């Protein structure tokens, strides 16, 4: 078969060469009705337009989305603006008073450098706003959306030029619960009162690789979050205020976070995935009134784990010789801890879970060592 193929190669080459040299056709820009999309001009999509619920604006040559660009499109539920290299600016009131609009996606518009304050205004049914992979340098103003939808999702991602989350950044966005997906940006600092006026279900700050400072009062005026993810950041400390609402804490590959606030700050913590084994041991300080005859076993285990984690040789982080322990305990909370060592090819767990019943079984899982098979060439 191979001989036959090699024999045909001289005959196939002239036929394949034009296909290889022909440039790929670029996706064609389509300006949908009722819009006007002049090259290097301003987008206009006037309404009303009966039956129009989805407006997809991709690969368009426009430079500007002006004020009242979608005025009268009262039936539109979703607007998607993406894959535009020419879009540079979105003016105030561009998305204004669209009473049925549920989703806005602004994605892969790398030359979009400015979204004016008030661009998103009076959108009571908005459930999802995504602004990703743009060139904007400031966090967009979302404080005039006034959505009434439960579990509103705001996604701000891969905007490498935004460096700060200012105070009151999300106040007025939604009067119900919200999820903030703020990952992969250029954040360096989160200021005081940043989340003021919000009810946070989940706050994702993962992969903000330049994020070093989170003000101690960042959660002042906020309820929540229940879930906090700070993985792959350079945060050196967590705020001491607002941690009592956290049920799930995720901090993998957070090598700068070498010290956690005291255990008493995490009064409702149920689940944690952390970077250093010693972080698990920090949670050994449970209320003395809940101790029973078996607590001394857990206390001895914690001390052993902590002393091992503090040894100067990094290899001991994955060589803790604590045997698995099972014992009967009476405690009022549920906690599950997994701590990973900074080692590339090994990990250590130093964890426990306590199940919320009148009587409880506790299982400590410690010093599980393994290789992920990471081969680097």
Image: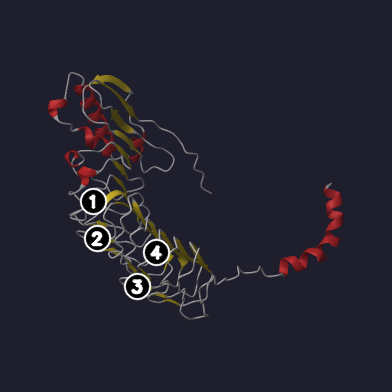
Q: Which mark is residue 101?
A: none
Of pointers 4 and 3, the one earlier in the residue sequence: 3
Which element is circle 2 on? Answer: loop
Q: Which mark is residue 93?
A: 3
Query: 208 or 268, which lies in front?
Result: 268
Which element is circle 1 on? Answer: loop
Other-residue count near label 3 (Cα within 10 Å), few / some / many at <14 / 14–19 / ≥20: many
Of pointers 2 and 3, the one earlier in the residue sequence: 3
Q: Which mark is residue 171?
A: 2
Eye-nearest disc, 2 or 4? 2
Residue under numbered circle 1: 237
Residue 221 spot, x, y in % from top left: 18, 54
Of pointers 3 and 1, the one earlier in the residue sequence: 3
Q: Is residue 310 visible?
A: no
Q: CA distance from mark 1 to mark 4?
A: 24 Å
As drawn, 290 above or below 269 = above
Residue 187 spot, x, y in % from top left: 32, 61
Query: 132 or 213, which lies in front?
Result: 132
Please identify the residue farthest to the left as the structure is shown. Answer: 289
Residue under numbered circle 4: 159
Residue 76 spot, x, y in % from top left: 45, 63
Q: CA distance from mark 4 to mark 3?
A: 22 Å
Residue 197 spot, x, y in % from top left: 21, 56
Q: Residue at x 40, y 58 (%)?
A: 102
As drawn, 246 above or below 14 = above
């Amino acid at each position: 078969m191979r001989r036959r193929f090699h024999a045909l190669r001289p005959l196939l080459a002239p036929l394949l060469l034009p296909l290889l040299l022909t440039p790929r056709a670029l996706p064609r820009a389509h300006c949908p009705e009722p819009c006007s999309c002049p090259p290097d001009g301003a987008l206009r999509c006037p309404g009303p337009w009966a039956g129009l619920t989805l407006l997809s604006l991709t690969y368009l040559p426009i430079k500007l989305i002006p004020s009242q660009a979608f005025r009268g499109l009262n039936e539109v539920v979703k607007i998607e603006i993406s894959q535009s290299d020419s879009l540079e600016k979105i003016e105030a009131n561009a998305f204004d008073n669209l009473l049925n609009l549920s989703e806005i996606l602004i994605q892969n518009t790398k030359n979009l450098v400015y979204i004016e304050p008030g661009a998103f205004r009076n959108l009571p049914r908005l459930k999802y706003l995504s602004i990703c992979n743009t060139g904007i340098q400031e966090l967009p103003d979302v404080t005039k959306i006034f959505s009434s939808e439960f579990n509103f999702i705001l996604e701000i991602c891969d905007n490498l030029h935004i460096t700060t989350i200012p105070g009151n950044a999300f106040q007025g966005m939604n009067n119900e619960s919200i999820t903030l997906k703020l990952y992969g940006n250029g954040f360096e600092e989160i200021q005081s009162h940043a989340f003021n006026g919000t009810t946070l279900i989940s706050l994702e700050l993962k992969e903000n690789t330049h994020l070093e400072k989170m003000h101690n009062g960042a959660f002042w005026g906020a309820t929540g979050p229940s879930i906090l993810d700070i993985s792959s950041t350079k945060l050196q400390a967590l705020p001491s205020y607002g941690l009592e609402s956290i049920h799930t804490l995720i901090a993998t590959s957070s090598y700068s976070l070498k010290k956690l606030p005291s255990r008493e700050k995490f009064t409702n913590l149920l689940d944690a995935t952390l970077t250093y084994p010693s972080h698990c041991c920090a949670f050994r300080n449970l209320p003395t009134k809940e101790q029973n005859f078996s607590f001394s076993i857990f206390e001895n285990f914690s001390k052993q784990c902590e002393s091992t984690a503090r040894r100067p040789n990094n290899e001991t982080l994955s060589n803790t010789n604590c045997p698995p322990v099972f014992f009967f305990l009476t405690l009022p909370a549920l906690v599950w801890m997994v701590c990973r060592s900074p080692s590339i090819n090994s990990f250590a767990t130093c964890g426990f879970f306590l199940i919320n019943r009148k009587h409880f079984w506790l299982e400590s899982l410690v010093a599980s060592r393994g290789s992920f098979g990471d081969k680097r060439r």
